[in-house]
């Protein structure tokens, strides 16, 4: 009964008494842990504390009363929340649905209240990206002196990621922005005989993890398309016939659609329409 009364008292203080609100953002990775730190003003001697989840659902997570730490409250973090002696709350292992807003209410020995709000954002680990090489210009009989290629990078089943490219083994590793398309997913490069061993790496990252995949695009300029390497001509052989079929289907629908509602062809010239008998005669 004393514990319940103390909880209601803390919530009442949070609603009525003036307090200072601060904000912080915490990032975590699925399967890892996140530490929500309870900051306090200088000289603030904590007597009681309460941690809550505010969004997406409001739940009681942990409390500190009369020197006792308690986390066994029914919530989605039951069994995954640990309240440390400094009253910071650790959540582990993190799940993809743990992102949300949290608050901690602290009350000192003089009855002053201090509230801090925090935002937790949980990200999944970035998978290894897939890089494809599309050859825009290549020789048929003789190896080309120059080769224009497009490198396409894609990371499956992930969001909130950033794409970047790196030229391996070069002094200047920066990629010129003019050769990037689709928010960095596609890179256009021109290769010469001196670039036979040059490799390009696509790097995908989010705030908590990253991964990369590396290709040597010059090899695609002299070999037939292999897994992960498709020529520009091969792409056209697929796209052009499909596009023609779509155009023909559209023309057919346009031609027959308006005609379907018309009457049959009028009586031809030279033909005499049969007379209709007069029922009154």
Image (tube, rainbow, N blue to C red):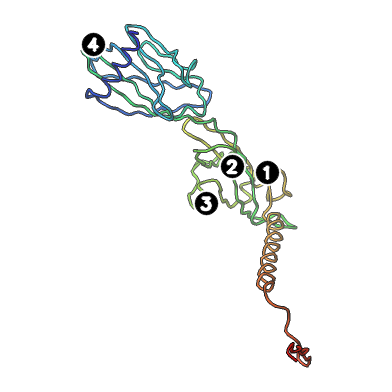
Location of residue 169 by image quarter: top right
Mark 1, secondary structure of its residue = loop
Mark 3, secondary structure of its residue = helix
In the picture shown, does residue 181 fall above or below 165?
below
Location of residue 127 by image quarter: top right
Total numbered badges shown on the rendered structure: 4
In the picture shown, does residue 188 fall above or below 69?
below
Q: What label does residue 154 carry, if any?
A: 2
Whether the residues at callouts 3 and 1 have beta carbons within 8 Å, the answer is no
Q: CA distance from mark 3 to mark 1?
A: 21 Å
Q: Position of residue 258 (x, y in %)?
A: 65, 72
Question: What residue would you read off at disc 4?
Answer: 109
Question: What residue would you read off at disc 1?
Answer: 228
Mark 2 crowd level (few <14, some 14–19, many ≥20, 10 Å Cα): some
Whether the residues at callouts 1 and 4 have beta carbons within 8 Å, the answer is no
In the picture shown, does residue 216 fall above or below 145?
above
């Amino acid at each position: 009964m004393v514990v319940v009364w103390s909880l209601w008292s803390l919530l009442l203080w949070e609603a009525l008494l003036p307090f200072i609100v601060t904000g912080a953002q915490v990032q975590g990775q699925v399967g890892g842990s996140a530490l929500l730190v309870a900051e306090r003003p200088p000289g603030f001697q904590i007597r009681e504390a309460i941690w809550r989840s505010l969004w997406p659902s409001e739940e009681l997570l942990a409390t500190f009363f009369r020197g006792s730490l308690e986390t066994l409250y029914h919530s989605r973090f039951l069994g995954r929340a640990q309240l440390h002696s400094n009253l910071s709350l650790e959540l582990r292992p993190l799940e993809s649905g743990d992102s949300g807003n949290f608050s901690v209410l602290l009350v000192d020995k003089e009855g002053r209240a201090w509230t801090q709000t925090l935002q937790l954002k949980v990200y999944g680990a970035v998978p290894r990206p897939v890089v494809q090489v599309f050859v825009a210009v290549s020789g048929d009989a003789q190896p080309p002196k120059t080769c224009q290629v497009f490198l396409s990078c894609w990371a499956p089943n992930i969001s909130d990621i950033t794409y970047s490219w790196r030229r391996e083994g070069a002094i200047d590793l920066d990629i010129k922005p003019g050769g990037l398309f689709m928010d960095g997913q596609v890179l256009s490069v021109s290769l010469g005989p001196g670039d036979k061993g040059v490799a390009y790496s696509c790097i995908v990252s989010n705030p908590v993890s990253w991964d990369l995949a590396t290709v040597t695009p010059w090899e695609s300029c002299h070999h037939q398309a292999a897994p992960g390497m498709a020529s520009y001509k091969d792409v056209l052989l697929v796209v052009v016939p499909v596009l023609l079929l779509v155009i023909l289907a559209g023309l057919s629908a346009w031609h027959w659609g308006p005609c379907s509602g018309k009457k049959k062809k009028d009586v031809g010239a030279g033909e005499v329409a049969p007379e209709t008998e007069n029922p009154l005669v």
